[in-house]
Image (cartoon, rainbow, N blue to C red):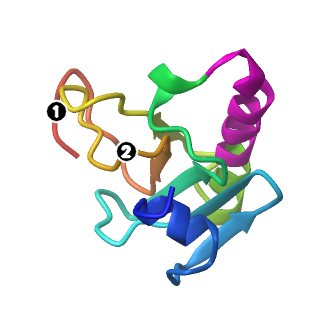
Amino acid sequence: MSDCVFCKIANGEISRECVLENEYLVAFKDLHPAAPVHVLVIPKKHISSLNDAGETDVTLLGNLLIAAKEVAKKTGVYQRGYRLILNCGEDGGQVIGHLHLHVLGGTKIGRKGEEL
């Protein structure tokens, strides 16, 4: 999708601080981190949201989760813990119309609606 900022990042048209990349996805540091570690994991294939993922995307979705675990290892939050967030749709907090996971860590993450 030509006007999607995450597609441009995935294609290398926009620079990013890459943490992990493979044939299916790119993981990079968030420009506006909500925690000491805040990495976005995005598929290279454009999928607008989880609602748009289909049966053919099962392997890709699994790769996103495994990549999130690898990001946690690479950023040093694997042992103490981290949070994965996948927002879906406007009311769910999704700001960019490209499926992505947030990997947050490096601090105690709030519980029961507490802010970070």
Q: Alpha-carbon distance for marks 1 and 2?
A: 26 Å
What residue is disc 1 on? 114
Answer with the quarter of the image where residue 9 lies: bottom right
Residue 27 image offset from top left, x and y in percent: 61, 60
26 sits to left or right of 82: right
Q: Nearer the viewer, mark 1 or mark 2?
A: 2
95 sits to left or right of 46: left
Q: Secondary structure at mark 1?
A: loop
Amino acid at pointer 1: Glu
Residue 38 image offset from top left, x and y in percent: 43, 59
* First to last magenta residue range: 54-68
In this rendering, the answer to whether 99 lies above or below 3 is above
Report the number of discs: 2
Residue 48 image offset from top left, x and y in percent: 46, 38
In this rendering, the answer to whether 75 lies above or below 87 is below
Q: Could you tell me if the residues under marks 1 and 2 are in contact, i.e. CB atoms within 8 Å?
A: no
Q: Secondary structure at mark 2?
A: loop
Q: Main secondary structure of the magenta part?
A: helix
Nearest the eye: 107 or 20: 20
Query: What's the residue at 73%, 51% (across, down)?
Result: 70
Amino acid at pointer 2: Gly
Query: What's the residue at 69%, 44% (across, down)?
Result: 69
**Crowd class of label 1 (few under 14; some 14 to 19; many from 20; radius 10 Å):** few
Answer with the quarter of the image where residue 13 lies: bottom right
Magenta run includes residue 33: no
Magenta run includes residue 67: yes
What residue is disc 2 on? 97
- Closer to the chain start, of discs 1 and 2, is 2
59 sits to left or right of 96: right
64 sits to left or right of 15: right
Residue sitting at the far front: 2
